[in-house]
Amino acid sequence: MTHAVTNSRADLHAESSRARQRSLALARGDERAWADLFDAWFDQSAALAARITGADRDTARDIAQDALLRAVKSIRPVDSDAQLHAFLRRLVHAAAIDRLRADTKRAAREHRSIRFDHTGTAPPIDPDALLAAIDSLPHDDRALLLERIARDRTLRQLADHHGLSIGAVHGRLRRLTVQLRAALDPRDHS
């Protein structure tokens, strides 16, 4: 039994040494070590990404590639293959969650950008409601908006005329656009 325990300790020490050497080579950017890791882990990473996201094969492969690229930037020496595998699984999980979040945000932006009715056309805007909404704006905001639209002034021209930065003019116009949309369609909360 002592012999088996000694062999087991020796095996663990050898595995730890190999894992540490492999992770050090990865941290150094050794191309062969990365090629071996990619060959060994890419399909497993893609399968894990597909399970997490429910994505198709190509999307799952993109996520796996993102995760392995993250590994290139953040790999640290580890003492066992189990630690390396856990690190890679965490990266795949994080990349998959990031993809889901990005897809959700993109879909929400696309949904907000243009609302179409069942015929595929933009919903009509009541001109009287639009004029009432514009008239309800504070004087300075209304002037800025009308100069931009009716006089076709650039952001630079508006900034110079009003003594503001271009970013401030852009931000105000964006805020005014959101306010007008909300006034015309209370369901719009963009």
Image: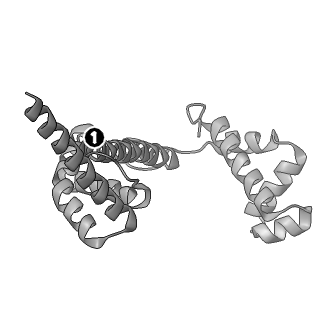
Location of the C terminus by quadrant is: top right
On the picture, is 16 further left or further right than 43? right
Q: Can residue 67 be seen?
A: yes
Q: Does the image show residue 119?
A: no
Return the x and y of residue 186 as percentages of the image width and height: 60, 31
In terms of depth relative to the viewer, which is nearer, 81 or 124?
81
What residue is shown at x 80% (from left), y 70% (from top)? 156
Tell me the quarter of the picture where residue 40 sits: bottom left
Picture quadrant where residue 2 is located: top left
Residue drawn at (63%, 42%) of the image: 181
Query: Is residue 58 toward the left or the right of residue 112 in the image?
Result: left
Comparing 165 with 143, the one in front is 165
Give coordinates of residue 187: x percent, y percent: 55, 31
Secondary structure category for the residue under label 1: helix
Q: How many marks?
A: 1
Identified at 28% across, 40% down, the residue is 53
Q: Which residue is mark 1?
A: 53
Residue found at the far front of this picture: 2
Seen in the picture, residue 179 relative to 33 is either above or below; the reply is above
Q: Residue at x 39, y 46 (%)?
A: 103
Q: Is residue 133 above or below residue 38?
A: above
The amino acid on which the numbered mark 1 sits, given as a three-letter code, is Thr
Q: Is residue 183 above or below residue 166?
A: above
Name the image quarter holding the N terminus.
Answer: top left
Q: Position of residue 8 (x, y in %)?
A: 14, 37
Camera-side residue of 38 and 98:
38
Residue 138's x, y, as percent? 86, 42
Q: Quadrant of residue 143?
A: bottom right
Q: Dot 1, how many residues are within 10 Å of its Cα: few (below 14), some (14-19), or many (20+)?
A: some
